[in-house]
Image: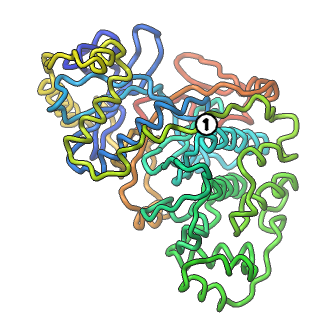
């Protein structure tokens, strides 16, 4: 059992009553806790050695900064970041999120009986979140089921903004990034071969289309083993792109490959997805247009007839573009100390009094009494005794350097292994929050997903809407 002074080094131990360790990984430890001020369950993540690699630290900085600005029911929310004992010497971060139960990857894997209502409601939440993100001129760039948190009441939240970018031009479509984007299976065609000179929000729309197709089919739509294989799978379904689309490609090698490809006729989606609502397939076809110019925006997709009676576009929030000044650090080479100071400045956003002193230049060089050694000793003890009845051990599945994300313990499957072999170290945000509705139609639908807590178990009232194949959702079953 953890000592209740889990976070004494930050002077905030009394606010959080620690319950148990729920996840461990290369980058830190996650514990479940109760916020004694609100009674809310939270997840607290310690990220180890944040500044060991400047590139990883910069992703963490980018993510916590973006999540400070992006407040939406279907986007993860940082509740608190604990104040470090020393401004210039701290190495670890302690970040507080609301506890979530699973992610969409495991929901789809564990449930082969999701209903059309599930599919519609899931897609609706993802698109309204994307509308909000894109209105801020932010591109997520790594949308996939594992980056979407889920609860048993069918609430979804987009997480993992470590690869996201903000646009600072008047035309948000005029964006070009050369670094790695998107897991291959959910990567837009224009990213597979650097096809176009300008990337647009349509790269996220494609990813949402792939996720929606995975909901309908129960398996990934384009599980390519290489970039070439990915393009082959895409064109097998969508057909060979027309000459005008190929003409827009800037990568000559990719242009030659597609031009020389044998002509393929598109496969009707009704054949690929039999017994699926034609309205759902009509929207899917729009989301998966090969040419990004023909994909709808998130707002246009929400207006699709598929969402008739559910969406209320007037109530779907948007926000002003994020200020260019907030991401000035993206334009210069940062040292380890630069990133530490910038992250410290972000931490102060959750400590208003300290922030005011910092901005006024009257901040003292404080040093809180530290309990880090005791903290490490406690976790060493827990890990040493895991598997001895105190807590069941499970294989670590985390490969990410950024914010945390809970995982239900399941063996890695072959698709995961194949997919991860080509992934760079993505930043990951395991964040937790409770979604809320954005329209009357959504209120009505969410009512059908209400939860009943009985004897510590979380159960969905209607068995048709049961997302998690477990009578009890227990934080001890989660792994980071």
Depicted 363 relative to depicted 114: above or below:
above
Depicted 155 relative to depicted 186: above or below:
above
Count residues near mark 1 (Cα–Cα under 10 Å), then give few for <14, some for 14-19, many for 20+.
many
Residue visible at 67% across and 27% down in the picture: 460
Quadrant hosting residue 134: top right
Q: Quadrant of the N terminus?
A: top left
From the viewer's perspective, is 121 left or right of 252? Answer: right
The percent coordinates of residue 267 (x first, y second) are 79, 74
Please name the colour scheme applied to the rendered image. Answer: rainbow
Quadrant hosting residue 88: top left
Depicted 191 relative to depicted 432: above or below:
below
Depicted 289 relative to depicted 123: above or below:
below
Q: Is residue 471 visible?
A: yes
The percent coordinates of residue 313 (x first, y second) are 79, 35
Q: Quadrant of the C terminus?
A: top left
Quadrant hosting residue 266: bottom right
Residue visible at 60% across and 35% down in the picture: 320
What residue is disc 1 on?
Answer: 156
Q: Is residue 397 visible?
A: no
Residue visible at 72% across and 54% down in the picture: 216
Helix or strand or loop: what does disc 1 sit on? strand
Q: Nearer the viewer, residue 385 or 171?
A: 171
The percent coordinates of residue 25 (x first, y second) are 30, 44
From the viewer's perspective, is 378 left or right of 75? Answer: left
């Amino acid at each position: 059992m953890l000592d209740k002074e889990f976070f004494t080094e930050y002077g905030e131990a009394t606010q959080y009553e620690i319950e148990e360790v729920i996840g461990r990984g290369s980058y830190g430890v996650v514990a479940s806790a109760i916020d004694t001020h609100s009674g809310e369950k939270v997840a607290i993540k310690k990220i180890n050695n944040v500044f060991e690699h400047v590139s990883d630290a910069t992703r963490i900085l980018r993510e916590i900064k973006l999540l400070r600005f992006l407040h939406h029911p279907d986007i993860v929310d940082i509740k608190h970041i604990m104040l470090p004992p020393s401004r210039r010497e701290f190495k670890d971060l302690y970040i507080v999120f609301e506890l979530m139960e699973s992610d969409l990857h495991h929901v789809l894997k564990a449930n082969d009986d999701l209903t059309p209502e599930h599919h519609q409601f899931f897609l609706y939440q993802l698109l309204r979140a994307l509308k909000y993100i894109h209105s801020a001129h932010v591109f997520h760039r790594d949308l996939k089921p594992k980056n979407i948190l889920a609860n048993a009441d069918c609430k979804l939240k987009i997480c993992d903004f470590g690869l996201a970018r903000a646009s600072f031009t008047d035309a948000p479509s005029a964006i070009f990034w050369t670094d790695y984007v998107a897991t291959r299976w959910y990567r837009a065609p224009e990213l597979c071969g650097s096809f176009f000179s300008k990337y647009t929000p349509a790269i996220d729309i494609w990813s949402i289309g792939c996720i929606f197709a995975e909901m309908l089919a129960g398996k990934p739509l384009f599980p390519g083993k290489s970039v070439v294989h990915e393009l082959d799978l895409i064109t097998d379904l969508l057909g060979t792109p027309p000459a005008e689309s190929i003409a827009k490609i800037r990568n000559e090698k990719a242009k030659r490959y597609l031009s020389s490809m044998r002509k393929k006729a598109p496969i009707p989606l009704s054949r690929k997805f039999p017994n699926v609502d034609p309205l759902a397939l009509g929207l899917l076809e729009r989301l998966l247009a090969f040419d990004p110019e023909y994909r709808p925006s998130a707002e246009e997709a929400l207006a699709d007839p598929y969402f008739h009676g559910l969406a209320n576009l007037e109530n779907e929030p948007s926000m002003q573009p994020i200020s260019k000044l907030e991401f000035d650090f993206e334009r210069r080479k940062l040292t380890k100390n630069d990133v530490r100071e910038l992250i410290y400045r972000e931490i102060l956003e959750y400590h208003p009094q300290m922030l005011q002193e910092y901005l006024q230049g009257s901040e003292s060089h404080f040093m809180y009494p530290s309990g880090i050694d005791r903290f490490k000793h406690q976790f060493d003890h827990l890990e040493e005794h895991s598997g001895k009845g105190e807590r069941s051990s499970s294989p670590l599945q985390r490969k990410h350097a950024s914010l945390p994300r809970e995982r239900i313990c399941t063996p890695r499957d072959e698709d995961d292994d194949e997919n991860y072999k080509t992934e760079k170290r993505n930043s990951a945000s395991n964040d937790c929050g409770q979604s809320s509705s954005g329209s009357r139609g959504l209120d009505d639908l969410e009512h059908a997903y209400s939860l009943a807590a009985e004897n510590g178990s979380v159960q969905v009232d209607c068995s048709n809407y049961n997302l998690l194949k477990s009578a009890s959702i227990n934080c001890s079953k989660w792994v980071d």
